[in-house]
Amino acid sequence: MARPLKRFACQSCGAITSKWSGRCESCGEWNTIVEETAAPPGPAGSGLARGGPGRHKGRLLDFASLKGSTPQPPRYRSGIAEFDRVCGGGLVVGSALLIGGDPGIGKSTLLLQVAAALARQHTACAYISGEEALDQVRLRGERLGVSDAPVQLTAATSVRDIVASLERPDAPRVAVIDSIQTMWLDTVESTPGTVTQVRASAQALVELAKRRGIAILLVGHVTKDGAIAGPRVLEHMVDTVLYFEGERGHQFRILRTVKNRFGPTDEIGVFEMSDRGLADVANPSALFLGERRGQVSGACVFAGIEGTRPLLVEIQALVAPSSFGTPRHAVVGWDSNRLAMVLAVLEARCAAAVGANDVYLNVAGGLRISEPAADLAVAASVVSSLADEPVPADMVVFGEIGLGGEVRPVGQREARLREAAKLGFRSALVPRARAGSGATPRAPEGITIDEIDHLSDLVARFQPADRRQRRPEREGLADRRRN
């Protein structure tokens, strides 16, 4: 019998090396490489391409046509609207869902509420805790007001015991595993939480979900970079990956879909954290704009799209003279590289003197925006702060900016404008529609459209004072340096 081999695996990215080192060469993390036991290799010459006489050649596969009718998979609807939205309409029978987030953000709270809501609808649910005792889970249930729900609780970390319990004919139809990093399989000679254990445990649970038609919900820890801890293959094995985002100082929580084999990706659900748990937010736009103050320079309302939902959020910018030699750019809720590009275009293409100033950008409400359509709203907030002239309080802005300063159209224009009109906005600063793209989209009733082609058209609307005062000084200094 071949003896097991020793290998070293990075607990951050899953890279395998033959010797230990302090720093992983794949991901660059320090002190993440640990020793693990690998399965012994098979006999020499046992590759599939070397099949000799007497070897099993495999059965012939049956191929089907791409054209055909496939019924929609059955789903368990929890009744929690925001959770069902990000799942594509509910939990699919026999699917595996992975949810990750920072410690204390509310992952266990959300899944306990989901399990209780399903159990009240006569769907047998089990909550399997590997981190907390049963008394702790019961205390959380009492605080959330769900202790009367018929949820089956247990504390276990052995995957073999969990699989055996869920194989019974009367086993629950939905199972929550909290968390996958605490699970261990006795056939793997590694400690719980290592790459090998996480991969093997997840594979056994996903295989159980497919075989028995049980919806499995896995809780995953995250690294300091915000990614789900463990091997990247963990996200490939499951059907749906959700990230729970938010700041502890804010009461808002964002549940974002990263991967979904049974629904749209990039969908979000908005929750509000209270002493009674997480509550759905039916109208996130009104919530994000609830504390907005009008007639303040540097504030602009952006009409964005998150998944299939139009969402209005306030973007705030503050431009202040720099007290150091190198100006500082601080960003919360947006890409810092994207901000640097917008500032460079304003400086080079529109003669806006922002290069010598500190720029602070914030997306109000704790939401993180990733779509390029926010470029124009960011530029409007920066120019507004630079000129100390507020953006009209009843105006929304969206559009993408190119390196030449051109303002490019973005998708789902009508949906953005309808959401703005519904919340009482009366004007919109948007890119000009493409020529030859068909009929010109009509604006919703009660909202006026202002179309622009170039970023300089936006700067001209504010007429910043430092464009007239500081720019000649900068040009004179440049002339003196050349002479």
Image: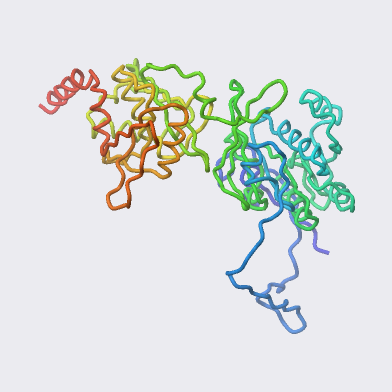
Residue at 23% in and 19% down: 466
Q: Note whether 122 is above or below 277 in the view shown.
A: below
Q: Quadrant of the N terminus?
A: bottom right
Snapshot quadrant of residue 4? bottom right
Q: Is residue 269 shown left or right of residue 213?
A: left
Snapshot quadrant of residue 113? top right
Is 480 in front, or is 365?
365
Give the mark count.
Answer: 0
Q: Position of residue 322 (x, y in %)?
A: 34, 17
Is 462 in front, or is 228?
462
Q: Quadrant of the C terminus?
A: top left
Is 213 in front, or is 235?
213
Q: Name the outermost residue toward the left.
A: 483
Q: Is residue 357 shown left or right of residue 419?
A: left
Q: Note whether 461 is above or below 432 in the view shown.
A: above
Is 190 in front, or is 404?
404
Q: Is residue 1 shown left or right of residue 461?
A: right
Q: Position of residue 423 (x, y in %)?
A: 47, 28
